Amino acid sequence: MAMNLIKKTSEYKIFKRGDERFAVQDATGKPVNGEEKVNILLAEELIKVTLPGAEPEPVEEAPAEEEAAVEASGEDEAPADEEVADA
């Protein structure tokens, strides 16, 4: 897997891996992981963090209610019967 150097400082090197993720090495060449890695990538604005548990906005259910009303009234079935009778 090829890694491309993105940024090099006196404290660390940031690479972009072949699978589009990032790898960070310290000045001695050892990998940096965990919270320290996240903090480095955030400082360089390479990633964005979203808080866990953030619920997406609820989707409106109006179209589902409209479909139920159409099914209950039988409007979908009537035109189909008329087309068959005309043929």
Image (cartoon, rainbow, N blue to C red):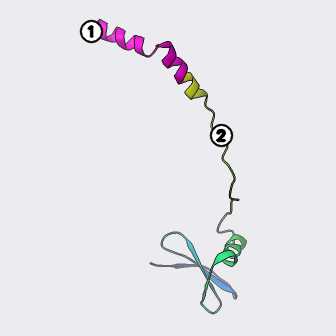
> Residue 42: x percent and y percent?
70, 70
Q: Which mark is residue 87?
A: 1
Residue furthest to the top: 86
Dot 2: within a 10 Å radius of its alpha carbon, few (fewer than 14), some, or many (20 or more) residues? few
> Residue 17: x percent and y percent?
51, 75
Q: Is residue 19 above or below residue 55?
A: below
Badge 2 element: loop
Q: Is residue 81 left or right of residue 28?
A: left
Q: Is residue 53 left or right of residue 2?
A: right
Dividing the picture into quadrants, the one containing residue 52 is bottom right
> Residue 61: x percent and y percent?
61, 31
Q: Is residue 84 left or right of residue 70?
A: left
Name the residue located 65 percent from the left edge and 66 percent from the top edge: 47
Q: Is residue 29 above or below residue 80?
A: below
Kind of residue at disc 1: Ala
Which residues lie in the magenta part? 67-87
Q: Is residue 29 above or below residue 66?
A: below
How far apart marks 2 and 1 lie (CA) works out to 45 Å
The residue to which callout 2 is attached is 58
Locate the N terminus by quadrant.
bottom left
Kind of residue at disc 2: Pro
Locate the C terminus by quadrant.
top left
Name the residue located 61 percent from the left edge and 27 percent from the top edge: 62
Q: Are marks 2 and 1 in contact (CB under 8 Å)?
A: no
Q: Earlier in the sequence, mark 2 or mark 1?
A: 2
Is the stretch drawn in magenta largely helix, strand or loop? helix
